[in-house]
Image: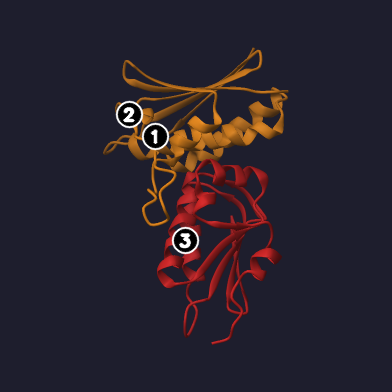
Chain colours: A orange, B red
Amino acid sequence: MIERRATVPGDAAQLSALTEFLRDFWSSADLAPAQFTSFELALEEVFTNIVMHGSQPGRVPQVEVSLVLAGDGLTMTVEDDGPQFDPLSLPPPDITAGLEDRPVGGLGVFLIRQIMDAVSYQRIGTRNQLRITKHVTR
Amino acid sequence: MNVRLETVGQTTLVIPEGRLDFGSAALFEKQLEQAFVRKPTGPAAVIIDCAGLEYVSSAGLRAFLLAARTAQRAGCQFALCGLQPSVRDVFELSGFSRIITIYADRAAALAHAPTAQP
């Protein structure tokens, strides 16, 4: 089992640091490059949701990302101490709508559900926890 | 991310390179707006050559959607071309490949662009 953890403030400028953290994990776990983009995308979508929904006046949430590779399952857990927010409760966007009616938001969570094997949300005490799992190959 | 604009006849070519994520999407949206500015009338077509685009998230998709709407309102053709496989996946999963025309490469996209002089 390989496990890594990173904590950053929920500020959009931290996205590149988190992507680097994921990239480092990928090479140390010797995972196939083809699946990197799925996790890169999921991490960005989850993190930017927290940046947009998790800040309160004068307070930026702390965001903790952990990656655990056990067997051939990779679990990415993202926790923040912002206000309660379950991104999975958002209604899915209508992806058959025409150009003018297509909603501009809500796509991030939809994409995560499409590319990952399992996604779950839990409110634990004062923290939001989103857990994402996917089968990976080495 | 870098973005270059080129003019080919009545067509404006937009050539982004690098990553289109939450951090770069706002800048890309601004540069796409510039692609529709052309005197005395707007371009007949705007083509985005995505061959150099390595990554797109939902923030990037939003920029493409807004540009496609701008084009439709302006009566301007709008298409993408040269999508790398991982970028193409995001367009297909999101259903965007059904509302935005996508060509295999720049030559195919230009071949479909209007060439008639006013």
Q: Residues within 10 Å of mark 1 (few under 14, many from 20)?
A: many
Furthest-left residue in this view: A57
The reply, left or right, for residue A9 in relation to residue B111 is left
Q: Position of residue A14 (x, y in %)?
A: 49, 39
Residue bearing the label numbered 2: A85
Find numbered disc 2 in the image and state the secondary structure of the residue it sits on.
Answer: loop
Residue bearing the label numbered 1: A50
Q: Residue at x 55, y 68 (%)?
A: B46
Please name the amino acid that badge 3 sits on: Ala
The reply, left or right, for residue A17 in relation to residue A126 is right
Residue bearing the label numbered 3: B68
Q: Residues within 10 Å of mark 2 (few under 14, many from 20)?
A: some
Q: Are marks 1 and 2 on the same chain?
A: yes
Residue B16 visible, this angle: no
Q: To which chain does the residue with label 3 belong?
A: B
Q: Residue at x 45, y 36 (%)?
A: A110
Nearer to us in this view, B29 or A59: B29
Circles 1 and 2: CB distance less than 8 Å? yes
